[in-house]
Amino acid sequence: MAASANATNIVSRGITRSIFRWIHLIFSIPIFGYIYSPFDKIPNYAPATRFVFVPVMVLSGLWTWKGHVVRRLLSKRSAGATGSYSNL
């Protein structure tokens, strides 16, 4: 039974990583348009690029790169609140 639980966990992590990878790729397309568009059209793209596309791309890239560390920190914190963070 433990083997099936681990297999399910691995599949969900793989699917999650794939989803974040696709989000990262899709949200990078408007940034290329922002960079290579004519100068007179840049003000039209600026707010969406600054406040939506770049932050989503940065967060999805960081999650793809270091998501395993974040999951480990969150699981340690939620599993037993008896560490140095328990007094916060």
Image (cartoon, rainbow, N blue to C red):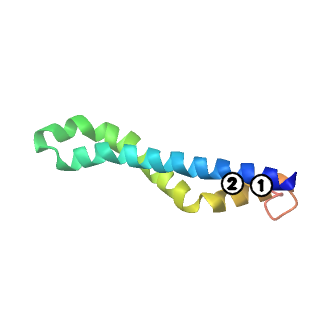
Which labelled disc corresponds to residue 77? none
Q: Amino acid at mark 2?
A: Ile
Residue position for label 2: 10
Residue at image position (39%, 41%) is 51
Disc 2 is placed on an element classified as helix
Q: Relative to residue 80, is residue 30 depicted above or below?
A: above
User: Where residue 46 sits in the image (x, y, percent)?
Assistant: 27, 41
User: Where residue 13 sits in the image (x, y, percent)?
Assistant: 64, 52
Residue at image position (84%, 63%) is 83
Drawn side of residue 31 relative to residue 81, left or right: left
Question: Could you say which is closer to the camera, residue 14 or residue 67?
Answer: 14
Disc 1 is placed on an element classified as helix
Q: CA distance from mark 2 to mark 1?
A: 6 Å
Q: Are marks 2 and 1 in contact (CB under 8 Å)?
A: yes
Q: Amino acid at mark 1?
A: Asn
Residue at image position (23%, 44%) is 33
Residue position for label 1: 6
How many C-alpha atoms fall within 10 Å of the one at disc 1: few (<14), some, or many (≥20)?
few
